[in-house]
Image (spheres, helix red, strand yellow):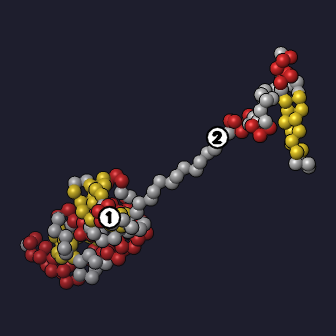
Amino acid sequence: SDSQKKNMIKITHDKRKGQEQTDKITEPEAQEVDVTKSKTEITPTKTLQEQTEKIIEPKAQDDVYNIEALLEKKGSKYLVKWENFPENENSWEPKSSIPSFILKYYEEDLSRLGEPAPSDNEQIEENVDSEEDDFEVENILKKRNAEKGKVEYLIKWKNFGNPEDNTWEPAGNIEGYTKLIGDFEKKLAADEK
């Protein structure tokens, strides 16, 4: 309408002069404002892009909690000592929330509970390699001929009381136990007579 067109104004800013200039305009897309307001009360309309853009805040990273040690086991839960937290912050956690390499480390030998947890898989592999030297043959229980005629012995390991811990080993793996092998072979020969 003509009455609306008369009340429309356009505000421009001359950057060179640092002055604002007010002109009456008749374009229908111009912002309709109350001309009785002072210039300082008039705010320009945001562009469509400014109106539709959303400020995307970076997501706050989840706090990282590092396991210092597993202290106790009850069923399928472990008491976790958290790195850089006091003992009153220890918590019981299900196996599913503990990294598998840490679980493996403790479950291989529950006497490790209370010792510092390994920091990564490589540390576990180093520990396993060094522990392989710690196995000591306590007794030879049986003998069998395996694939391609290779001889294997059923070994009872020292400090391992569970029969499930006994393993079949090729003769080459226990070469250092010649006296034990000799005694077993003599006993086996005597039993066959």
Question: Which amino acid type is marked by label 1?
Answer: Lys
Q: Is residue 132 above or below residue 96?
A: below
Q: Is residue 185 above or below residue 85?
A: below
Left or right: 157 as drawn, with respect to 131:
left
Residue under the point 84% across and 18% down = 3
Where's residue 134, x and y in %? 28, 78
Residue under the point 40% across and 63% down = 66
- Which residue occupies the foreground of this view, 9 or 136? 9
SS type, badge 1? strand
- Would residue 171 be visible to someone looking at this image? yes
Tell me the tag on residue 81: 1
Residue under the point 27% across and 69% down = 114
- Which residue occupies the foreground of this view, 140 or 148? 140
Q: Is residue 38 above or below residue 151?
A: above
Left or right: 102 as drawn, with respect to 41:
left
Where's residue 64, x and y in %? 44, 59
Other residues around mark 2 within 10 Å, as few (<14) / some (14–19) / many (≥20): few
Q: Quadrant of the C terminus?
A: bottom left
Other residues around mark 1 within 10 Å, as few (<14) / some (14–19) / many (≥20): many
Q: Quadrant of the N terminus?
A: top right
Where's residue 150, x and y in %? 30, 69
Left or right: 55 as drawn, with respect to 11:
left
The CA distance from mark 2 to mark 1 is 42 Å
Where's residue 96, x and y in %? 34, 52
In the picture of the structure, the residue carrying the numbered disc 2 is 54
Q: Is residue 151 above or below residue 15?
A: below
